[in-house]
């Protein structure tokens, strides 16, 4: 088996844990609000084997699906590998057979042509089903009660795209899911598939268009009228990949683009707006219509946040020297031309969270992860290799910003939002907080904090204790008890 490398993708909260387990009745400090009933699903990349080549990146680790299950004031925890084709082939061989991140030319010949996706990025709930997704392949359906893998999801054979985003958007009013897949027609293709699934989980539309260049489209937005596709200059190149190189390289001197089309329209109605050069973003808070205006709020930075994507593009910039802001881009759909307005709204950060009902609509508040300048540097870890140490709450209407920091050295992961039946209360955030436990960076304790969503500065009302370290998650999703009981797959 050998040993894991000690690079930023395997230390701190990225230390491989690799344990499938179930823990009943976790210890709780404080009190869990009685109305919290449901499951917090998390996507956790965690290597089942040492990488084929010396080093690797966290994005290339096997997907695990984890669940904090809240029932009658008690919390159970479970975590299990997603049994992708790739995971099962390597499990059988007892070693890595798939090589570098999104580079099939580096694989062991025995797995040629096999599906490479790891399903390690976002748990998605739609139409009574749970999926684990990653943007390089189709989603895998998971039984939400047992966490067993049910198989690859293709909408009963209807889906043509070879890929499915880890960031679909669900309109809470119509129940429809809007999604896309890029490199939809194969490695480095310009094809983007734009799809809609109805509230019951049936594919009702799939259209393909070409993006301006082969970029990583990690997230997109919907409003009540539009679908919005951002194109940032982190690009794939087939020759580089065939040479065994990186899938992605950031191009600092290349322009960005935003494609906007009516969300129920035809892809040839797409209008392309030209954006600044060299910028990058992985996640959008939200977008909404305001008369003829479209506002889109993006966690923007002046270069790519992933060091390996910068390095492949020859960009020398330390993580702490990256600049950015929560930024509002406003498009006037009544005017011709390809320009738009931009303004800063909040401190730099990423991993935003929005209440489900506010998707695509004017919103009162949202949350995202940021750095508390007074908090001291957090432990290394997380998808980028650098953790965040604060949750920021922003009211876009008036610019009010509040914050919850975590103890020195601790890291905080993306929260989920849990609505409250009491409109005065404002709901809850749940977030895993990893706190150092001595000088060894692999040694820390993970807790799930429950925080009043509209009073984040007050800190947690309850801490659910694992009494052990958990590997960093990427994204998570909250599914309430009624939805779980209404699931298509039963326990
Ligand atoms: C991201 C995560 C991925 C990936 C591409 O967080 C982008 C961004 C966990 O996998 O493959
Ligand atoms: Fe993401």
Image (cartoon, helix red, strand yellow):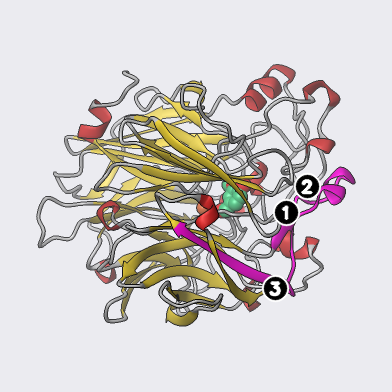
Whether disc 1's CB lies below 8 Å from ligand 1 is answered no
- Residue 303 has which mark? none
Tell me where residue 281 appears, x and y as whole percent.
Answer: 56, 65
- Residue 318 has which mark? 3
Tell me where residue 124 appears, x and y as whole percent.
Answer: 42, 39
Left or right of residue 110: residue 336: left
SS for dot 3: loop
Residue in the picture at 29% in, 62% down: 361
- Residue 407 can be seen, yes or no: no
SS for dot 2: loop
SS for dot 1: loop
Q: Residues within 10 Å of mark 1 (few under 14, many from 20)?
A: some
Q: Residues within 10 Å of mark 2 (few under 14, many from 20)?
A: some
Inspect the magenta stretch and tell me whether residue 170 lies in it. no
Q: Which residue is mark 1?
A: 7
Q: Which residue is mark 2?
A: 55
Disc 2 + disc 1, Cβ < 8 Å: yes
Disc 1 + disc 3, Cβ < 8 Å: no
Tell me where residue 465 appears, x and y as whole percent.
Answer: 35, 45
- Say if 260 sits above or below 163 in the image: below
Separation of marks 1 and 3 at Cα, in angstroms:
15 Å
Give whichever of 96, 466 is nearer the camera.
96
Whichever of labels 2 and 3 marks the residue nearer the N terminus, that label is 2
Tell me where residue 437 appears, x and y as whole percent.
Answer: 49, 55
- Say if 463 sits above or below 276 in the image: above
Name the quadrant of the C terminus.
top left
Q: Residues within 10 Å of mark 3 (few under 14, many from 20)?
A: few
In the image, the segment drawn in magenta is: 234-261
Whichever of labels 1 and 3 marks the residue nearer the N terminus, that label is 1
Residue in the picture at 73% in, 51% down: 6
């Amino acid at each position: 088996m050998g040993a894991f490398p000690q690079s930023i993708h395997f230390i701190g909260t990225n230390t491989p844990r690799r344990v499938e387990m179930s823990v009943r009745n976790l210890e709780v400090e404080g009190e869990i609000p009685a109305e919290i009933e449901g499951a917090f699903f998390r996507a956790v990349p965690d290597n089942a084997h040492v990488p084929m080549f010396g080093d690797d990146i966290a994005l290339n680790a096997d997907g695990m699906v984890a669940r904090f299950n809240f029932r009658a004031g008690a919390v159970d925890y479970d975590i299990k590998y997603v049994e992708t084709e790739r995971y099962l082939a390597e499990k059988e061989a007892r070693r890595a057979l798939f090589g570098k991140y999104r580079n099939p030319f580096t694989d062991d010949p025995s797995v040629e042509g096999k599906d490479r996706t790891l399903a390690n990025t976002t748990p998605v709930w739609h139409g009574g089903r749970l999926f684990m997704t990653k943007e390089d392949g189709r989603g895998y359906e998971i039984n939400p009660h047992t966490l067993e893998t049910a198989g690859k999801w293709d909408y009963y054979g209807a889906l043509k795209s070879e890929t499915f985003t880890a960031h679909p958007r669900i309109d809470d009013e119509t129940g429809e899911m809007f999604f896309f897949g890029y490199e939809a027609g194969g490695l480095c293709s310009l094809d983007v598939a734009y799809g809609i699934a109805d509230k019951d989980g049936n594919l009702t539309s799939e259209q393909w268009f070409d993006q301006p260049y082969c970029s990583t489209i990690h997230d997109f937005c919907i409003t009540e009228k539009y679908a919005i596709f951002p194109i940032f200059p982190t690009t794939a190149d087939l020759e580089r990949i065939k040479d065994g190189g990186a899938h992605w390289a950031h191009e600092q001197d290349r322009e960005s683009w935003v494609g906007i089309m009516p969300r129920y329209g035809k892809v040839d109605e797409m209008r392309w707006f030209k954006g600044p050069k060299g910028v990058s973003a992985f996640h959008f808070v939200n977008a909404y219509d305001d008369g003829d205006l479209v506002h889109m709020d993006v966690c923007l930075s002046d270069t790519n946040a992933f060091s390996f994507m910068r390095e492949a593009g020859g960009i020398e910039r330390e993580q702490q020297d990256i600049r950015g802001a929560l930024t509002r881009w406003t498009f006037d759909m009544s005017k011709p031309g390809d320009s738009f307005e931009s303004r800063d709204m909040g401190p730099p950060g990423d991993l935003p969270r929005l209440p489900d009902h506010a998707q695509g609509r004017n919103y009162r508040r949202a949350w995202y992860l940021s750095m508390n300048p007074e908090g001291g540097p957090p432990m290394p870890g997380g998808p980028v290799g650098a953790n965040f140490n604060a949750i920021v709450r922003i009211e876009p209407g008036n610019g009010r910003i509040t914050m919850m920091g975590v103890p020195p050295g601790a890291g905080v992961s993306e929260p989920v939002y849990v609505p409250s039946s009491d409109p005065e209360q404002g709901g809850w955030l749940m977030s895993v907080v990893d706190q150092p436990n001595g000088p060894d960076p692999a040694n820390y304790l993970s807790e799930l904090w429950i925080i009043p969503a509209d009073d984040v500065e007050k800190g947690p009302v309850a801490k659910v204790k694992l009494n052990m370290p958990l590997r960093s998650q990427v994204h998570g999703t909250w599914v309430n008890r009624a939805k779980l009981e209404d699931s298509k797959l039963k326990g």
